Each structure stands twice: as C-alpha cells, then as structure tokens.
Amino acid sequence: MVNAGIRKKIRGILENGGIASADFEAEQLLKWGLGEKYYMTGFSEEIDGERERLLTEAAIRRTEGEPLQYILGEWDFYGYTFKVGEGVLIPRQETELLVEKALPYINEDSAVIDLCSGSGCIPIAIAKKTGAKCVGVEISREAINYFSENIRLNGIEDKVRIAEGDVLSPEKSLLDSLPRADLITANPPYLTGEEMRTLQKEVRREPKIALYGGSDGMDYYGKIFEEWLPMLKPRGIFAVEAGDGQSGAIREIMESKGLSCRVFKDYGGVERVIVGEKGEPEIKGKGL
Ligand SMILES: C[S@@+](CC[C@H](N)C(=O)[O-])C[C@H]1O[C@@H](n2cnc3c(N)ncnc32)[C@H](O)[C@@H]1O
C-alpha cells in the first residue's frame, strides 16, 4: 500500500474505534511504525507489507484500550525520553509541575530522595537539570526494570541510583544506605476506591500498585511523612504531588509535622503540588 493509503487506514481505524484524538494519535503511530525515513517520504511512495501489518495491529490494540504510550514504548517527560510499558506508570504532565517547583531548591551538591519512583522520571529529570545526586525508592520489580533502563537511556548512571524497598515501612538497612536529603519528592499512589471503580479503560491497563491510595486515597501521605521526615536535612524540602481535592488534607498532615507549606495549581486549576520546608527551631539562648 502507498504511504497516503496507510495514513488514511490508520486514522480510520482509530476514528471508528472511538479514539477522541485520532489525528494526533495516528501521527504518533505513523512516526513510530514508519520510522523517520518513511514517515517523511512522499505520499505515493510504496510502504512494505510488514510495516503496514505492524501499524494496523498497533492501531487495533489502541482501539482495544491499550495506552498509546505503551504501544510506542516510550514517552517524553520534562524534555527527556523514558521507556514505558506494561507494569509501569506512564509519566504525567502534572508531575512536571512537581519537578519544576522542586528544582529551585537544589544544585549539583544536593542529595535527593524520590519516593515511589516508577519509571524514574522525577529523579532522572532532576539529576539531568541540576546535577544533584538522586536515589529513587521503588517496590515493584517491573517498574525497577524500566527505571534502570531509563537511567542508562538518559546517560545519568553517575547521578541516579535505585533503592529497592517499601516506602511505607522502610527497613533500617534501606534507610542506612541513603544520604540525608536536601529534597525529598514523592508522587505516591493516590486514587480513591471510587476513582478506581470509574477509571478510563487506558488507565485500567496501568498497574494498580501505582494508582490505588486506599479508600480515600490518603494511605501513603499518612505514612510517608512519618517515615521519611527524619531523612530530611534541617531546612530541607519535602515536595509531593496530590490528587484532585487532597491538597488540604495533605497540607494539614505536613504542617502538623512542622513543615511550612506552599501549594501550586496545575494547568487544569487543580491544587497539585505541595512544597513543605522543614524548619528547625532556632536556639536563641544558651540553654541550661
Ligand atoms: C503514582 S506512581 C508514580 C511513579 C513515578 N514517580 C511517576 O511520577 O510517574 C507510584 C509508584 O509507587 C510505587 N509504589 C507503590 N507502593 C509502594 C511502596 N509501598 N513502596 C515503594 N514504592 C511503591 C508503584 O510501584 C509506582 O511505581
């Protein structure tokens, strides 16, 4: 089939399959399936049958609910490319706000701990931008496999490492292996039970362990400040992402632990990122 024919066919499959942004997604699939050389070629150029078969299958998988990002096998976050697929959360645009708000607090001498790292998008973007040393804590083996591939892909082996472990009840050996941090970041699972029941079919393909935050979505926030605040240096920064409607409750927890907080809205107007600074009481007198 000629190039123009394939383009029409792929767009048609997506449109008939009810994909809302069929034009955009068709272009993404064509770029991926045809490769740079054939994607840029003339509309009357003959495209081999193998490429046509691959693209047709991909478009059908997409209409069956597979996320576009899993089909492409990679996605961009904060200007860097990350491998993604079954078993790891797709980096979201909202999470770029967390990185943006955290960056001003650190430099190449800083130590950063990222909790619930998934693909590694947060620590890798932070390390690439600032040169800070970052450790990402993650429990899922599948996510860790993507995380380590992404460290290699982004050539940041000297700055980012992975610590396998449970952020909710970290073992002493895990904590002992980590530096005191200037910055701790976290984008934990925060969807509520109700939100899990009404997920878009694409999101249902992402791992439940990356999404579900307990019936009210707050299970992780209740625990992570308790467990991880001692790992933050005096005057250190704790920056977290929040689900829609959760920022007030999270801020309350953070302030109850002595953090002074600022809240930032995402482009959709949702209070998405909370940045807390750890204040140490100033010693004014000589003491006893
Ligand atoms: C919402 S995803 C965020 C992934 C990544 N930080 C991002 O922004 O794309 C949450 C991640 O936390 C991990 N996770 C869930 N429970 C965990 C636990 N108890 N300890 C460590 N990681 C956990 C999941 O495997 C998942 O990768």
Image (cartoon, helix red, strand yellow):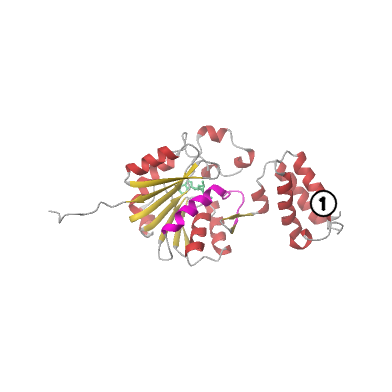
The amino acid type of the residue labelled 1 equals Ile
**Residue 239 point in image, percent of width and height:** 43, 50
Question: Dot 1, crowdedness within 10 Å: few (<14), some or many (≥20)?
Answer: many
**Residue 242 point in image, percent of width and height:** 47, 43
Magenta residues (range): 82-105
Furthest residue toward left: 288
Say if the magenta span includes residue 267.
no
With 138 as the anchor, is 205 left or right in this view?
A: right
Q: Secondary structure at mark 1?
A: helix
Residue at the spot x=76%, y=51% of the render?
Answer: 55
Q: Which residue is mark 1?
A: 6
Quarter assignment of residue 199: top right
Mark yes or no: residue 164 visible: no
Residue at the spot x=41%, y=57% of the render?
Answer: 105
With 57 as the anchor, is 128 left or right in this view?
A: left
Residue at the spot x=39%, y=43% of the render?
Answer: 223
| Front residue (pair 20, 268) | 268
